[in-house]
Amino acid sequence: MSPLDDELRRAMSERALRVQPAADPLADIERRARQIRRTRLACLALGVTVLVAGSAIAVPTLIEATGTENAPEVRLTTVPEPSAVPTPDRPPTPAPTSRPAGTLDPADPWPYRGERSVRTDFLAQVQAAWEGEHPDSTVSPLFGRVYEPSQQPELVFVASGPDGNWWGFAQRTTSVGSTEPVARITQQQKLSAGATALVTVLGADGGGSTVLVVAAPDSRGIFYAPTGGAQQTPMAMPVEGVTGVGIAFRDGDLSRDRVRVVAANGATVYDQAIAPASAAVTPANLLPWPQRGDRVAGPPENALKARFASAFDRTDDIDQVRYRALYAGDTDGGLRFTYGQAWFTGSQDAFGVGLTNGTGAPQPEFFLGPATDPSAAVLAYNISGQPASDEQVLVVIPEPRTTQVSYDSNAAGAFSPATPVPGGDGVYLIDRTLAGTSGSDRLQVLTGKGNQATDVSYQGPVVDLLCGYTSCS
Amino acid sequence: MDDQGREDFRCYVTHRSPALLRTAYLLTGNRADAEDLLQTSLAKTYLAWDRIREREALDGYVRRVMVNTQTSFWRRRRIDERPTEELPEVAGRDATADLDLHDALWRALAGLPRKQRAAVVLRYYEDLSEAESAQALGVSVGAVKSATSRALAKLRSDPVLADRTDDPRLTLPTGAQP
């Protein structure tokens, strides 16, 4: 214990001893309790009144949680009713379709709750990250908070698109070697029909786990039972005043813990054990680099997924393969290609993969690399088999903050700046001669201000970047 | 609430209000807000009295309500926390030096962000463990460690205490021994 700690204790004790409570605090407490109860009932009554009115005449009502982290306020703003003059051409508004209490409808998800800054500042990043794996999808935020220790936003969301309905959890992190914060989808799972609770298990500072439950906003209560015991305690609110969301911190094995959700009508709509293994966790080495190039130009990604599954003798698990393209495009010779990272759902590792296809190519050329180094400054992909040519094409995909890539066709020469692909957002296609493929060519990647003396993020043989899954030969 | 429940609640308030008020005072920085915070927190506890199963853990429950209420309470009121009470006479040690230092610490404490301040109060005044503090604050143990560490660092670097860098009572023990 430090001297400062001791003096701090003494200072606080000294100050605290000065205060004494009022003679009879109970009367004031009861008065305040009545006031709090009246306020709670008034809010509930007003909400019911608005919902009933909405079924007869189209009176749009805006309900927005304007709360910050600690003082959430719910404002009910009613748009003025339409004019009293009859409009015979307007059909009556149908009554809203009822759904079971407490269920999540991806077509009409629960309204956003939590810290407003997360929705305004983070949602767009999450949408962009999500679309990388699930094109043409729409992300709807459900709950957001700023994680206190890191001061970074976290978001629970639901998404709908051509590949179905999902829900997920995203955090903002800073990728290795970059100062740019990015959204990282750390958990994602198919959304079951009639879902009534979204349960996420996260790591907690200092070890242990954090269990986060998002249920319907009007849920009467969310309860937690460690080791499945009879004692169920209400879960804490991660953000003050935000209902229908609970959080708990636990050490040890959670496999017997249970979560129970009681809907507004008093019915138990969720009562299940924690199943953290069922959550589809994205690989820890998934690079948060932007997706570049023209994905339409590249070969079909399903073909790549099939080759990936086959490479691991898991042809029955093609539907569990996920792929995130880092670049897709065409070579000058007309070959289409795509290069990125692929993984199986639930796996901790994503692997570099590439596939070529196109008119005149003898066969689609598939490449499987090792598990991606999350600190990599540059990735490279060698395309051989160019139609009517002995040359190969070296695809260089550097990290986003790269300022210059230079190439030396043989170790005795000097580096010459390479020209990026027009519209390729910093990706380079470099013609590689047979001499270069013997292992003597080199690559140099500069970041920051492009100063060769200080900003070299990679300088070395090209072959070192072209290792396959099983060997580097 | 039935008569027995009401009597139990009254008994609890009578016996625990002094201690809880002192905690509320440290959280808010002035007496008026402390009384307001305590009354509001006890009112919320009153409404939940019948649902509270573990009566042995009432202090923890009220403390938690107080910390959570204080944060939203703080945002609405935005009260300036400059201490205004007169300093009492203290015998024994170098009284003047102690008073000056404690006053400086109190002012520095007033400048902490609300959650860091709450963490310091719970850890150093209430003497709660990290786990107990985490439960009261509704955060993880790691978050308590982080908040406490940042709070102490901020206290040491506070301009109010900046002139006292040579005060041995504010230095950390070093590894080397004289």
Image (spheres, coloured by chain):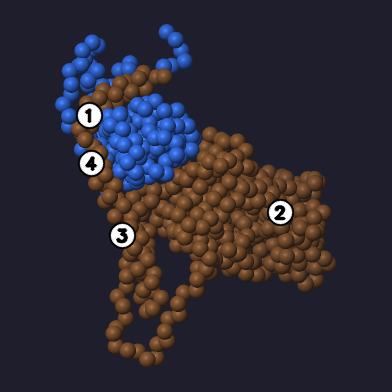
Chain colours: A brown, B blue
Q: Circle 1 is placed at which residue position?
A: A19
Mark 1 vs mark 2, CA separation in Å? 62 Å
Q: Is A471 located above or below residue B15 in the figure?
A: below
Q: Circle 3 is placed at which residue position?
A: A42
Mark 1: which secondary structure?
loop
Badge 3 vs badge 1, beta-carbon distance below 8 Å: no
Q: Do marks 1 and 2 share a subunit?
A: yes
Mark 1 belongs to chain: A
Mark 4 belongs to chain: A
Mark 4: which secondary structure?
helix
Q: What amino acid is at disc 4?
A: Ala
Badge 3 vs badge 2, beta-carbon distance below 8 Å: no
Q: Do marks 4 and 2 share a subunit?
A: yes
Q: What amino acid is at disc 1?
A: Val
Q: Which of label 4 and label 1 is nearer to you?
A: 4
Crowding at mark 2 (Cα within 10 Å: few <14, some 14-19, many 20+): many
Among the two numbered marks 4 and 2 on one chain, the one whose residue lies closer to the N terminus: 4
Q: Circle 2 is placed at which residue position?
A: A344
Q: What amino acid is at disc 2?
A: Phe
Q: Circle 4 is placed at which residue position?
A: A27
Residue B83, image x and y in percent?
20, 32
Crowding at mark 4 (Cα within 10 Å: few <14, some 14-19, many 20+): few
Q: Do marks 3 and 2 share a subunit?
A: yes
Left or right of A392? Residue A78 is: left
Mark 4 vs mark 2, CA separation in Å? 63 Å
